[in-house]
Image (cartoon, rainbow, N blue to C red):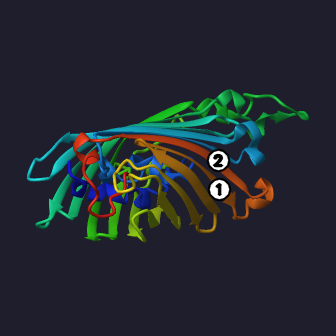
Amino acid sequence: MKCRNTIAGALLFATSILSVGNANAQDVHFTQFNASPLTINPAFTGAFQGEYRVSAVYRDQWRSALGTAAFKTYAVSVDMPLIRDISVDDYLAGGLQLYNDRAGDGNLNNFSGLASIAYHKFLGNEGKMALTVGLQGGYSSKNLDLSKLYFAGDFNEGGWNQGIDPTWGNLNNRVGSWVVNAGLAWSHAASDKFSYTLGVGANNLTQPLESFQKQRATKDVGLGIRYTAQAGAVIGVSERFSIRPAFLYQSQAAATELVGGAEVHYKLGDEYMFPGAPAIYAGGWYRYQDAAMMTLGVEFKGFRIGAGYDFNTSALKSSTGGNGGFEVMLRYIAASPIESARKLLYPCGRF
C-alpha cells in the first residue's frame, strides 16, 4: 500500500483524541488518545501506513484523592488491512479492541470487547482524498463488588451492619449488553506540507438498556447515543519538523466534551525522509473546564513509546491537589517493505 493510500491514517493522531464513555460509567479519558484509535471512531480502523498495528495504553487517574479506589483503565487493540486494491487503491480493514476500567470502593468494572471493519475509498486522479466508513460491534459488561458497598439502611445502632438495607435484595452484581457503533472519515492531502482529516461518529446505536437493579430495565437507564466530531491536521514546517493540531467534540445525553491542542513532532537522524525515521514529540492539550494535559515520547523502528499526564483544573482540584491521571503507552506498526523503500511525497504520519 503506497503512502498516498494512508491519508486516512496520516492524521489519526490528530483526530483520535479522547472518548466519552457511557453515561452510567467512567468517561473514557486517554490523554494519549492516539494510543486507542478504535475507541474514538471505527472509521480509523486500518488507517495507518504499514502491515499491521498493535496499540496498548494504561491510565491511573485521581490516585491522590481516591487512593486504592483510583480509576485504573487499559485499552489494547490490533488492526490491519484485510483486502487490498479492491478498486484501484481501495482496501478493507479489520480490527479488535479490548477496553477495561475499574474504579471506586465498589470496584465497578467496565469491560468491552469490540470488532470493527472499515472500507477506505480513495478519490481523485492522484488518490490524495479518501472517504472511509466504519462499523463496530461487540459486547459490553459491567460488574460491581456488592460486598464492598454500604447503604443508608445498613447503619443501625451506631454501627454499620451490611445487608440490612432492603436495597440489597434488589441488586445484581453484573449487567451486559450488545453495542453497535458507526463512523465516517474524510481525509485530504491538500499539498506536500498540509493534510487534514474530518470525522463523525455515533456510538451505542442500539441504546441498550442496563441496570444493576433486578427488576426489568427501562429507557431511563438505557445508554444514550454518543455523537462525536473530530478534526485534525498535519502541518509540515520543514522536512524534519511538523505541527499537528487537533479538535474533538462529543455529546451524550446532557453531557458534552470539548478537547483541543497540538503536538510538535521532530524527526532525527539521516533517514528523516523515510516513514520509519526516529523522532521525538511533545504535545499540549486542554479538556474544556476539566484538565490541562501534556504528552511526551519517542518513535523508532515502528515503535511509539510515550507518557502523558493530566493536571485537573475543574472544581475537583481542591480534592485532587490539581493532580489528574498518569498514562503510559506502547504502539507498534509493522512496516511494509515497499513503503520502507520509498521516500514520502507529502506529510504522511504513521498514526
Residue carrying label 1 = 310
Q: Is residue 216 above or below residue 276?
A: above
From the viewer's perspective, tell me whether residue 76 is left or right of residue 165. left
Q: Is residue 114 above or below residue 35?
A: above
Residue at the image point whose x is 77% and y is 47% from the top: 64
Q: Residues within 10 Å of mark 1 (few under 14, many from 20)?
A: many
Residue at the image point whose x is 69% and y is 59% from the top: 312
Residue carrying label 2 = 326
Mark 1 and mark 2 residues within 8 Å of each other at the beta carbon: yes
Residue at the image point whose x is 13% and y is 67% from the top: 124
Extreme left residue here? 87
From the viewer's perspective, tell me whether residue 117 is left or right of residue 324. left
Question: What is the x, y in percent for residue 170?
Answer: 59, 33
From the viewer's perspective, tell me whether residue 108 is left or right of residue 335. right
Question: What is the x, y in percent for residue 190?
Answer: 27, 72
Q: Is residue 139 visible to the viewer in this orientation of the structure?
A: no
Q: CA distance from mark 1 to mark 2?
A: 7 Å
Q: Is residue 253 above or below residue 1?
A: below
